[in-house]
DNA sequence: CCTCTCATGTAAGACGTTACATGATTCA
DNA sequence: TGAATCATGTAACGTCTTACATGAGAGG
């Protein structure tokens, strides 16, 4: 259950309410995950019941919308987070990707269409890379880990592009042969 | 629902029963996904009901275990598969990884412990890479796409290793500073 | 007036994982 | 005899997504 611990993690930055948590994730980690209220609000409720976070209602007179429910970490929450953070390391599994899922089976379909999809993918990654590079300086923080994750995004992107282009070449050559 | 279409994809190779499907996935795509019977058998039943695959029971006298239920693609199944294969392309999202999930928050924990976990990760990826390289020749098929996926696994691995080592350096330097 | 943003939430369903239950055969 | 392999499956649980319901204030 990563959402649970992600919430605990984010609350280290500052006290937040559900809406802000989603916003924060989208802005800062949007390139690696997405969350929705269907996950956030039930999890906040649960975390509070478990005593890992505590809630205080911010009744803001004159401001828009319903009262914010601001959550903050409790000591128990900090502890639970630390345990998770450095606890039993799960093994990694990159490479779970909807495009690659299909890619394995491209051999059972039309090669021309496969080339088209590969080209689309190349364009998408090129746009992505440009976006990441342009934001790179703007996003620089004091946190090595956050910086390095951004760096990894760029590296990953470059690698995928190189691979896609190489793949394109090989597939095109195979088409010619026939 | 990728399991559904993965089954349809695998049945292009040959008729299979549930047990064999799991085995095949583990052998050939084990580095990118895992499946379990809780997914396979219900999906087979559903696919049959939808008319995308058909079943024939192989009663094998003298052989071990219950009779195999061999499934094969129907024409409708082939069609549905082609639609999925080249249908509306979803956008990719690499970088969903349990280690990286934690990594973002390493700044909130002990740096020495972070270094330890990074080292563990490096070792794991090194073992992985060695395994992939050794199997590379053995796994070579006529299928460009399958070959390229294996290649991608290797490239991904190399990139992650380079990144982890660079990260290790930067984190270690940060520790020294204090 | 209408739409956008801020803010809360729930319900239904799709998807995945874990853990069991069953039973025959093979092999040490 | 006991464990491993082959082969079927289900039930319970956990997670995630989609879609809806509500409502106030701000701005065009």
Image (cartoon, coloured by chain):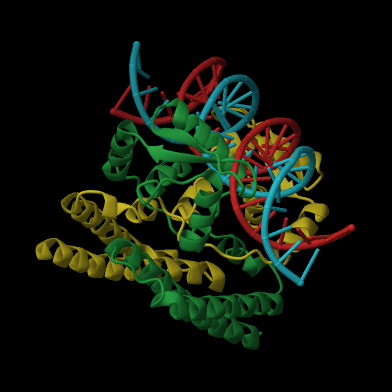
Chain colours: A yellow, B green, C cyan, D red
Looking at the image, is B21 positioned above or below residue A88?
A: above
- The answer to whether D3 appears left or right of C13 in the picture is right
* Residue nearer the viewer, A125 or B46: B46
Query: Within the image, what quadrant is residue D27 found in?
Result: top left
Looking at the image, is A11 positioned above or below residue B50?
A: below
Looking at the image, is B11 positioned above or below residue B118?
A: above
Query: Within the image, what quadrant is residue A166 found in?
Result: bottom left
User: Is residue A122 visible in the rendered structure shown here?
Assistant: yes
Q: Write the residue at 51% across / 77% down.
A: B131
Q: Write the residue at 54% across / 82% down.
A: B170
Pinpoint residue A62: horizontal percent, then vertical percent: 57, 28
- Total marks in image: 0
* Residue nearer the viewer, B115 or B10: B10
Query: Within the image, what quadrant is residue A58 found in?
Result: top right
User: Is residue B167 visible in the rendered structure shown here?
Assistant: no
- The answer to whether B64 appears left or right of B78 in the picture is right
Pinpoint residue B82: horizontal percent, then vertical percent: 28, 41
Pinpoint residue B56: horizontal percent, then vertical percent: 47, 35
Looking at the image, is A11 positioned above or below residue A138?
A: above
Pinpoint residue A23: horizontal percent, then vertical percent: 51, 45
């Amino acid at each position: 259950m990563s959402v649970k611990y992600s919430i605990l993690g984010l609350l280290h930055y500052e006290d937040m309410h559900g809406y802000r948590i989603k916003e924060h994730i989208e802005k800062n980690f949007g390139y690696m995950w997405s969350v929705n209220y269907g996950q956030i609000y039930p999890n906040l409720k649960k975390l509070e019941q478990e005593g890992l976070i505590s809630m205080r209602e911010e009744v803001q007179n004159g401001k828009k919308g319903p009262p914010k429910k601001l959550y903050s970490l409790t000591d128990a929450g900090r502890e639970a987070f630390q345990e998770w953070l450095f606890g039993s390391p799960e093994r990694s599994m990159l490479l779970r990707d909807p495009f690659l899922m299909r890619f394995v089976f491209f051999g059972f379909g039309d090669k021309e269409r496969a080339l088209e999809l590969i080209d689309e993918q190349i364009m998408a990654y090129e746009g992505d890379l440009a976006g990441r590079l342009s934001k790179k300086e703007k996003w620089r923080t004091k946190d090595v880990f956050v910086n390095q994750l951004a760096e990894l995004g760029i590296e990953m992107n470059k690698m995928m592009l190189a691979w896609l282009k190489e793949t394109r070449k090989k597939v095109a050559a195979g088409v010619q042969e026939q």
